[in-house]
Image (spheres, grey):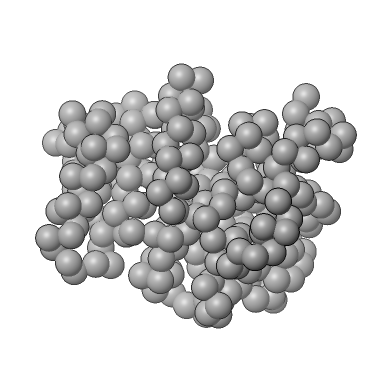
Amino acid sequence: MLRQMAEQRVLLNVDQLKVNYGAVQALQGVSLQVFEGEIVALIGANGAGKSTMLRAVSRILKPLEGTITYDNQDILRERPDTIVRMGIAHVPEGRRVLTRLSVEDNLKLGAYTRNDAKAIKDDLEQQFVRFPRLKERRAQLAGTLSGGEQQMLAIARALMSRPRLLLLDEPSLGLAPIIVRDIFNIIRELNKEGVTILLIEQNAQLALNAAHRGYVIEAGNIPYFDVASNLIHDERVRKAYLG
């Protein structure tokens, strides 16, 4: 597995990244790599710096130090909309759908960086095939959807930008187990279709079962990482995150 990864292309490379929230250093020089075609899980306790990492990659937050390269391009100084155009989409924690707009309008806004109208229309229909519940509710206000439906909408909206790299922040948060199963089945299918995924998930068992590799983040540092199947059996991970 490790030899196979060495032959893969590095899609995202984060090196010695430092990010502050006011006087608090949220990331203290962290490094990680995401290879093209894999699912990477980033696990850790609340407040460890997981969401900060994704916000830095999508350029919502400005790092103090370090480098972020995507597809061999330095993106540290790019604007968030440029990041989307380059092929990175971010599904934030809490879904953040536009509650007063319809499902269909939310999806169309996901393609705001594109101007290929025919392809956008085709992609819209593709999302309705992937998420049949959204098709049933295409004219419904997003704020009236259930939590699981809003999560599906948030993922579908991100896919409308045609990302190569999808950043997923806590996709199972607050959802019933049967909906979580559906969401993770979709995540696996997207990966099989060629979407590379960096996944944050409070349920470490769930995340590592879906991932190829995993990183553990603790208090703004990454003390260890490994193939996901090894981390599941790592005594440190089992004691801290698997119960």
Q: Residue at x 78, y 40 (%)?
A: 230
> Where 243 sits versus 121, above or below?
above
Residue 167 drawn at (x, y percent): 50, 53
Q: Residue at x 40, y 71 (%)?
A: 86
Q: In the rendered image, which quarter is residue 129 located in?
A: top left
Residue 104 drawn at (x, y percent): 18, 44
Image position of 62 (left or right of 187): right
Q: Residue furthest right?
A: 235
Residue 121 drawn at (x, y percent): 15, 53
Q: Is residue 90 visible?
A: no
> Where 100 sits versus 239, above or below?
below
Q: Nearer the viewer, residue 194 or 91?
A: 194
The number of numbered badges drawn on the structure is: 0
Residue 146 drawn at (x, y percent): 34, 26
Image position of 35 (left or right of 191): right
Q: Quadrant of the C terminus?
A: top right
Image position of 50 (left or right of 108): right
Image position of 118 (left or right of 130): left
Q: Residue at x 19, y 57 (%)?
A: 120
> Where 106 sits versus 221, above or below?
above
Q: Is residue 239 visible?
A: yes
Q: Residue at x 39, y 29 (%)?
A: 148
Q: Nearer the viewer, residue 50 or 11?
A: 11
